[in-house]
Image (cartoon, helix red, strand yellow):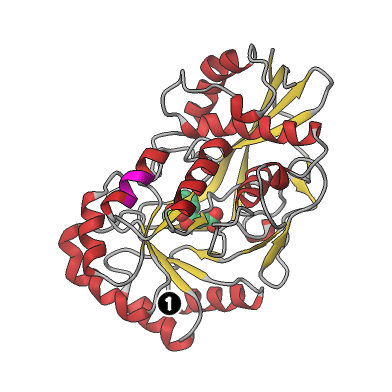
Amino acid sequence: MLAFEKLIIHRFKMPLKHPFANSITTIKDKDVIITELIDENGIKGYGESVAFASPWYTEETTDTVQHMIEHHLWPLIKAQRIEHPRELELHQVRRNHMAKATIEGAVWDLYAKQQKKPLYQVIGGTTNKIPVGAAIGMQSDDQQLLIKIHEALNEGYQRIKLKINPTQDLHILEKVREHFPTIPLMVDANSGYTLKDIDHLKRLDQYNLMMIEQPLAHDDFIDHAKLQEQITTPICLDESINTLADVTTAIELKSCKIISIKLSKVGGFTNAIAIHDYCQAHNVPVWCGGMLEAGVGRSQSLALATLPNFQFPADPGASTRYWHQDIITPEVEVHNGYVTLPEQPGIGYQVYLPAHQKVLT
Ligand SMILES: O=C(O)CCC(=O)c1ccccc1C(=O)O
Ligand SMILES: [Mg+2]
């Protein structure tokens, strides 16, 4: 049985090794919350808030996540006695998916540790070996970008994702394809375009891209469907996907051909698994997007990516690509383009946290 004794909130900043620039903002550091959930026998489960300090990507921020956990989610959860994490009831709180995922991830980790099984097996994963790709932020010059791509390929990453916007796309792709004509390549626009750019977007078809992630508005389905009709590059929705209902809408309207599932954005494992299963039943491939996660969130996103309908290399790669020092040991490592998850119970990594903490009982 899952009976929760206390929740410890750890909050701290982690500077990124390299600033990560996209069509909207540049991220220099991460405001991280780690939740440490402790059961009546002292077994601990961990979750991570992957929200950013400002609401540029979703409406949630680190502050709103902390507020929701302290004032709404922990009071809701601490009274619940359940046999399995999927019985956790969070529907009394609308949305706030990243806050929910922060606590829900800790419940799954705790449960897997009680069962003495790796988290990826508990969620139904079929392998512990996950192919990974590298997401490269916008660079100040083209030469720098080519170097970064070269380095990632040398480290074994199995596909490259570039951030684009309407003024930094065609000439960059031209250069990249000139140097790397056959690498698996995709782009992410983070809603940088509108349907008025349709003729421009059609020109991306010539670069043999695996997909274009979220070209249009963060909450749109109809314009994406109009665009998908006109371009051959598969559209992948990221920002538009927050719920299973969003996925059913996207598939029904043919707004995309691929879905990016982010564990945090859809509110945790139970919802993510439901979305995965729905997409699988409808022959729509999914893949695992990244959130510049620290080790706890990274290991949980990768655990999710062991489900069978994850069909493209995942975004979350080696800890060392992002952090001077991660909060887990061993750190997440990539060998020959794969992360191999540990077979230890739960997330399978030891967690080391800075001293600042707040205890909720
Ligand atoms: O390497 C990563 O973790 C993913 C990089 C990335 O593209 C991203 C990072 C932060 C927020 C949103 C996105 C995105 O996929 O749009
Ligand atoms: Mg994206």
On screen, residue 17 versus residue 357, left or right, reads: left
- Quadrant of image for the N terminus: top right
Q: Position of residue 357 (x, y in %)?
A: 70, 25
Which quarter of the figure has residue 110? top right
**Magenta extent:** 247-251
Q: Nearer the viewer, residue 346 or 193?
A: 346
Find out whether residue 250 is within the magenta segment.
Answer: yes
The vertical placement of 149 against 7, above or below, is below
**Label 1 residue SS:** helix
Q: Position of residue 181 (x, y in %)?
A: 46, 86
The residue shown at (83%, 22%) is 42
Q: Position of residue 23 (x, y in %)?
A: 35, 57
Badge 1: residue crowd in 10 Å (few <14, some 14–19, many ≥20): some
Task: Report if residue 18 is visible in the image.
Answer: no
The vertical placement of 177 against 138, above or below, is below
The vertical placement of 281 against 71, above or below, is below
Query: Could you tell me what secondary structure mostly forms the magenta stretch?
Result: helix
Q: Which residue is disc 1 drawn over?
A: 142
